[in-house]
Amino acid sequence: MCHVLNVHRSGFYAWLKQPLSKTAQDNVRLLECINASYVQSGAVYGSPRITHELRRQGESRSENPVAKLIRQAKLKANIGYKRRYFMSSIPSFAADNLLQQQFVVCEPDMAWVADITYIKTYEGWLYLAVVLDLFSRKVIGWSMQPTLTSDIVSKALLMEL
């Protein structure tokens, strides 16, 4: 069989004793360290940061072999998201500034303020509307929805009532 495959008998028997080369064994050991660093970072770190972590642990590998092992293990860094910009063709309605930037209130339920923000989750974007009482600075109503519609604010106000 060695003659047909054009392999020396000594090489075949050496492979039977130790099928992985020293480089392959080193890569397996390094991949365990990479997996540990990847899991410890919460699946956020990519090859530059993992390489930095490995160097702090005493490993002397450059970024390219680490990146190659990360690709072979099919590990992907969780990259941040880009800011969403909304462009509306319909002019928005701006309410009158009744408080005149005076946010100090002497009695409860005299002035409420509201805001809408968006949050990125694993399932997509989630919109949050919050209503605050300026006297106590407590949240008196809130509403969350996966779409940005006008009823998100009314639901937040209805929660308080």
Image (cartoon, rainbow, N blue to C red):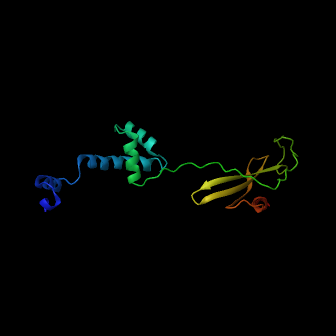
Query: In the drawing, does residue 82 fall left or right of residue 104?
Result: left
Relative to residue 41, is residue 5 depicted above or below? below
Residue 34 location in percent, x, y?
38, 47
Question: In the rendered view, would you say 157 is above or below 63?
Answer: below
Tell me residue 109's x, y (percent): 83, 51
Quick check: can you spot residue 35?
Answer: no
Q: Does residue 45 appear left or right of residue 146 in this picture? A: left
Residue at image position (64%, 53%) is 119
Q: Nearer the viewer, residue 22 or 105?
A: 22
> In the rendered view of the protein, which quadrant contains the C terminus?
bottom right
Identify the image quadrant of residue 130: bottom right
Residue 99, given in percent of the width and then of the height, sits at 86, 44
For residue 122, say whether it is visible. Answer: yes
Quadrant housing the N terminus: bottom left
Q: Which residue sits at x=36%, y=38%?
A: 57
Give the image quarter of residue 120. bottom right
**In the shown orientation, is residue 58 left or right of residue 135?**
left
The answer to which of 129 and 104 lies nearer the viewer is 129
Q: Which of 141/80 is in front?
A: 80
For the point 56% across and 48% down, the residue is 80
User: How many discs mark residues in the rendered view?
Assistant: 0
Using the rendered view, name the quadrant where residue 16 is placed.
bottom left
How far from the left and from the top, in percent, is residue 92? 82, 53
